[in-house]
């Protein structure tokens, strides 16, 4: 016993069906399915294997009396997580996934699991800590829970691309190795660029602004890099940003675009991810437009009334926001008109009151999803703002020079994809909203 099942190559073997395509309609033909074993159940003279593939799962049922001694003995050796191929016949089975089971006529092992995984793949929660899971992330990603999370992520991305393309936005790609910082507060990752120092991009900010000169409406979905010094459940060192920039528009226009984009995303998830939402036991409430808006100044007053020690000009922390008991702040809402001093140099100060800026943060409860603003489109004003923030305009020569050639008024925003997933799917730790998280402690896998 124990060595009937041997590892073999793929050779000419190919799948005939994905698990979602296995149905009684297939009739008497033999099917070939491939995947990994998510569970095995041994009932003496009957053996069940749940085979998972990208589309779902199929129950393989082997009765000793039906499949013969030799094949039955091989099936008994199948271990969880192994990568296998099963050839067999389909028949209805009420209790099995999709109402069918496959009765094997042949089995082939490609790669036999050598160890038991330190966690189960079925449940929604895992009893082991996130670090144990992340150390073996490719196996962790076989968990049903993360399957649902990342299928929803794909809907989010598709829905954003569809929505923005319909609104005549062009998808662009901008350099990730750059010469200067754009987001004052966030720390940079320095890199060697031949014989010079360069940085990983914290944001496509200046490039997306420049691209409005030629294309008016642009968006980019790509990585942003930030040397976040702290360990929190909402910061990554490498995140995915959805960056949008629109010419001939101000911050009110792009707030309206952003909230419509979110509604579109939610509608798409409800339509395309019914099974995932059911498995995750999540019902995303209907969203009403427009999202509530609070001015920064009003919130500071409210926070002071609630006893928070906060001054006009300070950042508003998630902890502070939790002290407010406003139901409308449980979902999506905007905080608008931030102090100009709290925002990066490219953000346009309000003409009526230069202390405040034409800027916003989109929040979900206490969590920041996105920030955006009307941008400065005049060179002299941009140089002045750089100087005020202690930046050297000479370092931005490559950027400032294009302002001599007709920069349109423009506005835009950047939204963190992982933050949005946290909000929509109720993920506690941002690390589970990305495939291979990077943080201060983790550079592998
Ligand atoms: P900001 O710095 O606010 O703005 O970033 C925009 C959004 O990106 C997400 N985000 C992060 N997500 C995970 N981990 C991080 N370390 C991290 N840092 C940022 C957040 C945040 O709201 N250039 C401007 C955007 C613009 O004005 O267009 C910018 O980068 O969801």
Image: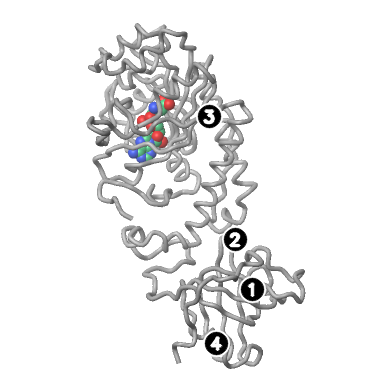
Give the number of the disc on residue 96: 1
Task: State the CA–CA distance, disc 4 to disc 2.
Answer: 27 Å
Local SS, label 2:
loop
Pick the residue in front: 357 or 287: 357
Quadrant containing ligand 1: top left
User: Mark 2 or mark 1: which is in front?
Assistant: 2
Task: Indicate which disc, 2 or 3, sits on the residue closer to the N terminus.
Answer: 2
Task: State the CA–CA distance, disc 4 to disc 3.
Answer: 55 Å
Local SS, label 3:
helix
Question: In which quadrant of the rendered view does residue 325 lie?
Answer: top left
Residue sitting at x 51%, y 69%: 36
Kindly tell me whether residue 322 is visible in this rendering.
no
The residue that label 4 is drawn on is 43
Task: State the CA–CA distance, disc 4 to disc 1.
Answer: 16 Å
The residue that label 3 is drawn on is 258
Local SS, label 4:
loop
Residue 46's x, y, as percent?
58, 87
Q: Residues within 10 Å of mark 1 (few under 14, many from 20)?
A: some
User: Mark 4 or mark 2: which is in front?
Assistant: 2
Task: State the CA–CA distance, disc 2 to disc 3.
Answer: 32 Å
């Amino acid at each position: 016993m124990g060595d009937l099942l041997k590892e073999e190559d793929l050779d000419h073997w190919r799948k005939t069906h994905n698990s979602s395509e296995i149905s009684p309609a297939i009739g008497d033909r033999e099917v070939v399915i491939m995947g990994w074993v998510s569970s095995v159940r041994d009932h003496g003279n009957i053996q069940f294997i749940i085979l998972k593939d990208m589309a779902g799962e199929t129950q393989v049922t082997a009765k000793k009396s039906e499949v013969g001694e030799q094949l039955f003995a091989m099936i008994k050796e199948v271990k969880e997580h192994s990568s296998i191929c099963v050839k067999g016949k389909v028949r209805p089975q009420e209790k099995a996934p999709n109402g069918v089971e496959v009765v094997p006529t042949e089995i082939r092992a490609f790669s036999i699991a050598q160890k038991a995984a330190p966690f189960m793949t079925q449940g929604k929660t895992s009893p082991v800590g996130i670090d144990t899971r992340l150390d073996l992330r490719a196996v962790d990603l076989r968990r049903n829970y993360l399957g649902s999370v990342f299928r929803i992520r794909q809907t989010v991305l598709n829905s954003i691309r569809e929505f923005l393309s319909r609104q005549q936005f062009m998808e662009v790609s901008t350099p990730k190795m750059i010469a200067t910082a754009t987001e004052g507060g966030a720390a940079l990752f320095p890199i060697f660029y031949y014989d010079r120092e360069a940085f990983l991009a914290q944001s496509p900010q200046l490039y997306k602004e420049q691209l409005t000169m030629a294309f008016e409406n642009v968006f980019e979905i790509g990585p942003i890099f930030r040397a976040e010094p702290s360990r929190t459940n909402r910061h990554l060192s490498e995140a995915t940003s959805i960056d949008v920039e629109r010419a001939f528009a101000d911050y009110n226009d792009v707030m309206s675009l952003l909230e419509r984009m979110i509604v579109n995303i939610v509608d798409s998830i409800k339509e395309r991810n019914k099974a995932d939402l059911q498995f995750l036991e999540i019902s995303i409430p209907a969203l009403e437009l427009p999202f509530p808006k609070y001015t920064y100044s009003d919130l500071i007053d409210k926070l002071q009334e609630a006893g928070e020690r906060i001054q006009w000009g300070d950042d508003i922390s998630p902890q502070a926001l939790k002290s407010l008991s406003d139901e409308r702040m449980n979902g999506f809402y905007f905080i608008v008109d931030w102090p100009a001093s709290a925002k990066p140099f490219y953000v346009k100060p309000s003409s009526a009151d230069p202390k405040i800026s034409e800027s916003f943060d989109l929040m979900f409860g206490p969590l920041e999803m996105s920030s955006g603003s009307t941008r400065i489109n005049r060179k002299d004003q941009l140089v002045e703002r750089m100087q005020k923030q202690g930046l050297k305009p000479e370092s931005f020569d490559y950027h400032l020079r294009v302002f001599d050639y007709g920069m349109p008024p423009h506005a835009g925003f950047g939204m963190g994809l992982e933050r949005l997933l946290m909000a929509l799917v109720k993920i506690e730790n941002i690390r589970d909203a990305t495939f291979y998280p990077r943080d201060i402690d983790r550079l592998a896998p």
